[in-house]
Amino acid sequence: MNIQTIKGFKDILPDEIPKWDFVEQLLRKLFKSYHYKEIKLPILEETTLFARSIGTGTDIVEKEMYTFDDRDGKKITLRPEGTAPVVRSLIEHNLMAATPLAKLFYIGPMFRRERPQKGRYRQFYQAGAEAIGPSGPLQDVEMILFLSQFFKEMRISNLTLEMNSVGCPQCRPNYKALLQEFLKDKQTGLCENCQRRTLINPMRVLDCKNESCQKMLHNAPEMVHFLCGECHDHFEEVKSGLGVLHTVYRINPRLVRGLDYYTRTAFEWKSDFQGAQNTIAAGGRYDGLVKELGGPDVPGIGFAMGIERVIALMDPSLTPEIELPLFIAALGKTAQEAALLILAELRENHIGAEMDFQNASLKSQMKKADRYNARYVLIIGEDELKSGKATLRQMKTKEQEELPLQTIGETLLEKLRPPI
RNA sequence: GUGAGUGUAGCUCAAGGGUAGAGCACUGGUCUGUGGCACCAGUGGUUGGGGGUUCGAAACCCCUCACUCACCCCA
């Protein structure tokens, strides 16, 4: 049996790289204009970090984390998400004191041991942003605006933005109790999972995809109607900010985030395509998290986006096939050596060029050039060496011209230098 | 963790007990130094792996592995 990738792990092959490059470059460009700075963090963290932040009752912590004993016995985990490590790092390096507001972004792999399916892998890439420190409701709006612009520039339409507020430690307990009360006499109609959830985390019943569960939720109390004054005002200001920007959204009172640390604003971008895993990006506020992890009592908000999911939806015309500026077809040892010299000169000037080292027939070299999508082919053979001129063929138009070998390097640089 | 489907050439797929095939791709030729098109020829397979039934298995049975989709959950 040949060795192959571990289940749920994927090779990103050369043909797909242009898409990844495009996404990452666009993200970096946009993050720069939104004044977010990049942070690169370890892939392994102490297990406690995730248990404390994401919540011990969540599926991620309960059954999806890659957790190992390190050689000294310490429990370590492949990061399943990016927010907790960012917060950890800010606290560890006391970066909150250095900036009025820490606006950071990251791009990198996350790991969750779920059963793979379309749009879901055990190693997957997320791009995320966090704004940690004193801020206001318009910070939430900025986050959403960023994603809105990103999707627009990616030419991804058919996305819906869903919004909700999940309250705070002041108002959520009351609501939870109310919801529990509501669900009490509906247990028989709920799936097994939701019966359990009613006791542990009743809000998770709200976004159960089971049809019969959804039926039972008719007339269920909605968090938005039980927000405390501050949460209510916050949510109103977020909505009003989105209105100013003409951002289209849908209030989804059933939208509940899966991680324990979320407070107030929750949002999610969903796609009409992409099968069952249709959440492309999601995020929310986590006002208690920094303090929970041992830092100052400052609010925070962030989002994460699944890069594979974005790439699956992106417009392929954004990454056109790459052209090779020049292919040199050389025939014979002397010609090959001359070609090598030209190749070196072009590459020194950062111009893409290629030749064949096999001394194949001209025909097969032309074929190769064609497959490389070469713009020009420079032919150097016996005839050319004798006459001191090389043949330059433009592949698309089939036009050919003779160029003196003496000054060939300069001539080619002139022709191939990309216009600025 | 549960369920269903699929594993045959580099890729997409035929053959449903009787000699493993096609298209695309690749290599060469027609065209001895000029790519794409056309035609011709060639290379390429322990039919995912193991066991069983049979005179004979890619096919039928059992086990196993992998992939895919869905449940669950989530980006």
Image: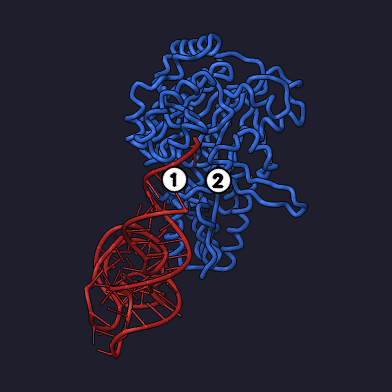
Question: What is the chain identity of the residue bearing mark 1?
Answer: A
Residue A22 sits above or below residue A164 on the image: below
Q: Are marks 1 and 2 on the same chain?
A: yes
Q: Which residue is mark 2?
A: A64
Structure colour scheme: by chain
Which chain comes out red in the rendered image? B
- Across and down, in percent, residue A62 comes to 57, 43
Q: Earlier in the sequence, mark 1 or mark 2?
A: 2
Q: Residues within 10 Å of mark 1 (few under 14, many from 20)?
A: few
Residue type beneath disc 1: Glu
Residue pushed farthest front? A185
- Across and down, in percent, residue A223 comes to 46, 19
> Toward the viewer: A329 or B37?
B37
- Across and down, in percent, residue B5 comes to 31, 59
Residue type beneath disc 2: Glu
Q: Which residue is mark 1?
A: A321
Colour used to depict chain A in the structure image: blue
The structure residue drawn at horizontal position 47% and vertical position 50%, both measured from the top left corner, is: A115
Q: Is residue A206 visible?
A: yes
Question: What is the chain identity of the residue bearing mark 2?
Answer: A
The structure residue drawn at horizontal position 46% and vertical position 50%, both measured from the top left corner, is: A116
Residue A190 sits above or below residue A395 on the image: above
